[in-house]
Image: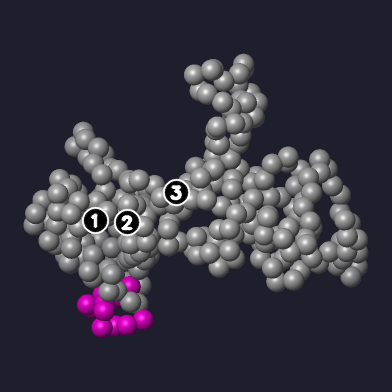
Amino acid sequence: MNEEYDVIVLGTGLTECILSGIMSVKGKRVLHMDRNSYYGAESASITPLEDLYKRFNIPGNPPDSMGKGRDWNVDLIPKFLMANGQLVRMLLITQVTRYLDFKVIEGSYVYKGGKIHKVPSTETEALASSLMGLFEKRRFRKFLIFVSNFDENDPKTMEDVDPQKTTMRAIFQKFSLGQEVMDFTGHSLALYRTDDYLDQPCIQTINRIKLYSESLARYGKSPYLYPLYGLGELPQGFARLMLQTGSQSCHITSHHFRCAEDRTV
């Protein structure tokens, strides 16, 4: 190990690994330390399955019906990545994608009227979908065109909408969209968990819908990507980026730091 470093990063969560990777690329000497024997902290993917049983104090071993333990990668915090989201763009810019494989999620679904419906990903699917009636689809299409063209820096695209004052509820009323379409838009496209967004400024919801549409346009089937071996691959990818630059990573069970008057550690 080197005797001197510019930066010491504690923990191998996704945020910490992104920081250490970026700083090492910028020429900083980074020492990355973690008390765990695995990367990822709260965003880790636990493998093999036997380790998951130990982590949560589940008695016994996984049953044979669950297959080989090494075939399992269980995310502690399951999430998908938006294909055109900020994190994916960061992965591309830093070329961390060299160390990762991704799969496009086959599709997303909603539950309505006692049935499961596929969220349309093409114009053909949209026309055939029973999620909306024919006239609702026409109004919804006009709404999506408005969202796609909306630019908060160009008043010509706003159609008298103030992005910081006009609520999302008012936008839905502007296009005569009913409650079912509002629910579909807010929860399936903008991905809100509650309806609080309806009475908040519309700009955030518009940006969320645009992100969904742009992500869907990248691969066609759905807007979501997922690392082939679990979300724990993300912090590991940035850690590999850091190691490629000559910085170092180590796992220790305990540590103690002392700060000098000149703020060195």
Residue drawn at (36%, 81%) of the image: 153
**Could you tell which of marks 1 and 2 lies nearer the N-terminus?**
1
Inspect the magenta stretch and tell me whether residue 126 lies in it. Answer: no
**Which of 61/131 is in front?**
61
Q: Height in image: 142 above or below 107?
A: below
Task: Name the mark on residue 122.
Answer: 1
| Residues marked 1 and 2 touching at CB (< 8 Å) | yes
The stretch of residues the image draws in magenta is 153-163
Q: Height in image: 24 above or below 45?
A: below
Q: Disc 2 marks which amino acid?
A: Gly
Q: CA distance from mark 3 to mark 2?
A: 13 Å
**Could you tell which of marks 3 and 2 lies nearer the N-terminus?**
3
Task: Name the mark on residue 103.
Answer: 3
| Quarter of the rendering containing residue 264 | bottom right
**Which of 7/206 is in front?**
7
Task: Name the mark on residue 220.
Answer: 2
- Position of residue 173 in the picture relative to residue 224 (left or right): left
Mark 2: which secondary structure? loop
Mark 3: which secondary structure? strand
Q: Height in image: 46 above or below 201?
A: above
- Looking at the magenta stretch, what is its main secondary structure? loop
Mark 1: which secondary structure? loop
Crowding near the residue tagged with mark 2, few <14, some 14–19, many ≥20 C-alpha atoms within 10 Å: some
Residue 70, given in percent of the width and then of the height, sits at: 59, 31
Q: Disc 3 marks which amino acid?
A: Lys
Q: Height in image: 124 above or below 115?
A: below
| Quarter of the rendering containing residue 215 | bottom left
- Position of residue 108 in the picture relative to residue 44 (left or right): left
Crowding near the residue tagged with mark 3, few <14, some 14–19, many ≥20 C-alpha atoms within 10 Å: few
